[in-house]
Image: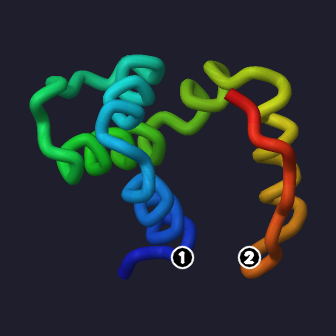
Amino acid sequence: MMSITSFTYRSNLNLVHKESLFRIAVFLGVSVGKSASKLTMIDKIDSYAKANPIEVLEKLCVKVLELVREFVKAGPDTPVVKAPCR
């Protein structure tokens, strides 16, 4: 059974362009070829993030960590509106 969190995370990754997915994989240190399919990139990033949450969080900047905190605090089905950051 797939959790809502996993489903939502994968759905959001599917909205990201393939080039950006590749940059996310490189940033996280996930081994994936630039010619890999978008689905393969999503699978590898998703698997890595679920298996290594501490390592992923350690790589994020303070501004992004604050955004993550807002999402957690808001809970499911509550929209969080923040200014986008790079």
Residue at 38% across / 48% down in the picture? 46
Q: Residues within 10 Å of mark 2 (few under 14, many from 20)?
A: few
Point out residue 11 in the picture as x, y percentages from the top left corner. Answer: 44, 65
Residue at 86% across / 38% down in the picture? 66
Say if 61 sits above or below 10 in the image: above
Q: In the rendered structure, are the residues bearing label 1 and label 2 in contact, judged by CB atoms less than 8 Å apart?
A: yes
Question: Element type at marker 2?
Answer: loop
Cα separation, mark 1 vs mark 2, equals 9 Å
Q: Which residue is mark 2?
A: 76
Q: Quadrant of the C terminus?
A: top right
Say if 38 sits above or below 7 in the image: above
Task: Give the left or right position of residue 67, taking residue 24 as reference.
Answer: right
Question: Element type at marker 1?
Answer: helix
Point out residue 49 in the picture as x, y percentages from the top left corner. Answer: 46, 41
Q: Which residue is mark 1?
A: 4
Residue at 83% across / 63% down in the picture? 80
Residue at 42% across / 41% down in the picture? 51
Q: Quadrant of residue 4?
A: bottom right
Say if 48 sits above or below 72 in the image: above
